[in-house]
Amino acid sequence: MTWILPATLFGRRELLALESLFRAHPNGCLVMVSSMLDSRRGLKLLEPMLNRGLKLLAVTPDLDYLFTNTPAEAWYSEIKTGNRDPGGIPLAQNLSNLIRLAILYKYGGVYLDVDFIVLRDFSQLRNAIGAQSIDPESRDWTRINNAVMVFDANHPLLFKFIQEFALTFDGNKWGHNGPYLVSRVIRRVRGREGYNFTVLPPTAFYPVDWTRIRRLFKKPESRDERRWVEAKLLQLSKNTYGVHLWNKQSRGMEIEEGSVMETLIADHCLICRHAYSS
């Protein structure tokens, strides 16, 4: 995981995302790549989980070391020397897109966004990425997302992602260096020899589109809405590894009584909300 915002903004919902990860992977190891959390305040925030003996570490990334011997090395040098325009989108946001790729390329493992509730064990997944949307007629994917990625170290697809980032970087277009990037590359390389990866359907990681995320937080007001909540929870229990919460849209939403989100948190929290009341 990466976190580029101030530690003061790492709140209850983010902590619950971490809890859900450890609930599904009690022996897992989580590295939070964040200079903001690699601090005294960050340590205090993570203390409830550290006190339970969970394998959790916040680290400040050494970007020069991380990008060395990757296609991003020259790009980062140009950014540092002012010879490359970082664009109008905050550079930290684009660096987050690149950092996750470089870490997976060099070390392998699982990358998750922090606005993601884990529902089941990922250990059976290998070299996988998730479709965000599909064409209703062809059932082929129309967009891939980079919020969840599972890859072996030195995977050739990750190399292509990093190469694409460096060659086509645009700091003024939202998503160009993230979801749109992985979609562009996969569209070009799928079917080629030497690339062994799986594109999972939206139900795996993105069972609710960002335009409909409000419904997960809403209290059911009618019999039909209660049935919808029950059906959605059943669907998630069968086909979904986790739920991306689209934090940009959902951050200000309250989790209402009887909602899908209330049940998911109750079923997948580890320490649970009362531990963070202070």
Image: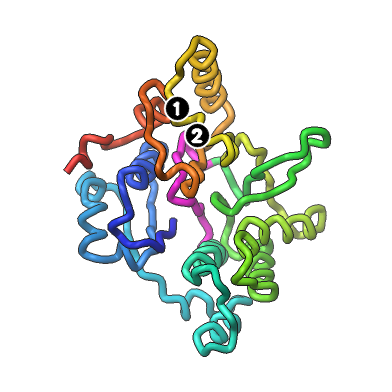
Does any portion of residue 177 appear in the rendered image?
yes
Q: Is residue 162 above or below residue 143?
A: below
Residue 274 falls left or right of residue 63: left
Q: Quadrant of residue 72?
A: bottom right
Residue 49 falls left or right of residue 236: left
Which amino acid is tagged 2?
Arg
Task: Look at 77% across and 55% down and name the residue there.
Answer: 187
Specify the segment rendered in magenta: 107-123
Task: Look at 48% across and 51% down and name the residue there.
Answer: 113
Task: Look at 63% across and 77% down and name the residue there.
Answer: 71
Does any portion of residue 106 appear in the rendered image?
no
Specify whether residue 251 is painted magenta.
no
Residue 232, x across and y down, in percent? 54, 23
What's the mark number on residue 121?
none
Which residue is denoted by mark 1 in the rendering? 218
Q: Quadrant of residue 269?
A: top left
Q: Secondary structure at mark 2?
A: helix
Q: Is residue 63 above or below residue 13?
A: below
What's the mark number on residue 214?
2
Which amino acid is tagged 1?
Lys
The one of 59 and 214 positioned closer to us in this rendering: 214
Task: Look at 25% across and 66% down and name the residue there.
Answer: 39
Residue 6 falls left or right of residue 169: left
Q: How many numbered markers are drawn?
A: 2
Marks 1 and 2 in Cβ contact (< 8 Å): yes
Q: Secondary structure at mark 1?
A: loop
Q: CA distance from mark 1 to mark 2?
A: 6 Å
How many other residues sit within 10 Å of disc 1, few (<14), some (14-19) or many (≥20)?
Answer: many
